[in-house]
Image: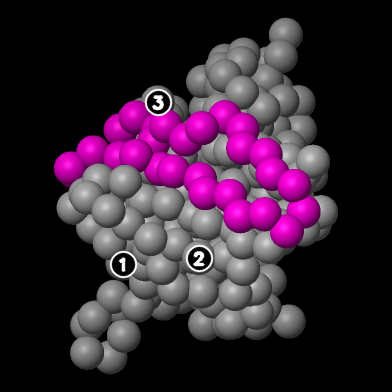
Amino acid sequence: QSALTQPASVSGSPGQSITISCPGISSDVGSYNLISWYQQHPGKAPKLLIFEGSKRPSGVSYRFSGSKSGNTASLTISGLQAEDEADYYCCSYAGSSTYVFGTGTKVTVL
Amino acid sequence: EVQLVESGGGLAQPGGSLRLSCAASGFTFSIYDLHWVRHTAGKGLEWVSSIGSADDTYYEDSVKGRFTISRENAENSLYLQMNSLRVGDTAVYYCARGGYFDGSNSYSHWYFDLWGRGTLVTVSA
């Protein structure tokens, strides 16, 4: 199972909105609405931001939102803040109890 | 406190072995699927392996035949035996909690809702 290809980097100014795409294939992103997104700061464990494509766990800021269209999932960060500077990964259930992560996107706040 | 704590990382030579452990607390360990996920500077996060509540196991292709995942519910512990290690296995290894089957045999969720802090494995001559 190949990794899902995310853009290597995305940047924005404070207050702006940015979107990270996660294009998959029909057998992972396209087959399941079981996309999750994780935020990882350097040296820290990943943190769940979005599950089932668009749902936020308790405690996650409303500024993070997820969506899916066809075989592509997306994460939008609105009202960009300095603390949002981190790596972001999508993850899709790939069947038979296996998962595939995206290649990761480094978000820079200008 | 609900947490996962990994241990057992370190330096190994190519072809060598290491055994990682993950101690769980604060939740009903036996019902959950548990996973190992690794992070490398070059590839980012990579799902490695999982074990279900019925001890069913699954592996990413590059570790099949080399890594073995296991669990000991009586000790609330998850393990990863890593043999025939390669330089490319160098990573921070995280244990992560997945979903579980509820009373109506429905699966709770397909994401990782609890992570440990990770343990560093370095494979180098």
Mark 2: give few (<14), some (14-19) or many (20+) Cα within 10 Å. Answer: many
Which quadrant holds the N terminus of chain B?
Answer: bottom right
Q: Residue at x 62, y 68 (%)?
A: A63
Q: Chain of mark 1?
A: B
Percent x, y of residue B18? 63, 33
Percent x, y of residue A90? 47, 48
Image height of B21 relative to A34, above or below = above
For disc 3, the marked residue is: B62
Q: Quadrant of residue B92?
A: top right
Tell me the mark number nearer the camera, choosing from 1 and 3.
3
Image: magenta residue range? A1-28
Q: Chain of mark 2?
A: A
Q: Residue at x 18, y 53 (%)?
A: A31
Specify the amino acid type for callout 2. Ser
In depth, the one of A85 and A4 nearer the eye is A85
In depth, the one of A7 and B9 nearer the eye is A7
Disc marking residue B16:
none
Image height of A54 relative to A83, above or below = below
For disc 2, the marked residue is: A65
Secondary structure of residue under mark 2: strand
Percent x, y of residue A26? 18, 42
In depth, the one of B49 and A108 nearer the eye is A108
Which quadrant holds the C terminus of chain B?
Answer: top right
Outermost residue, top side: B125
For disc 1, the marked residue is: B54
Specify the amino acid type for callout 3. Ser
Secondary structure mainly formed by the magenta segment: loop
Left or right of residue B84, residue A77 in this image: right
Q: Chain of mark 3?
A: B
Dot 1 or dot 3, earlier in sequence:
1
Image height of A27 relative to B35, above or below = above
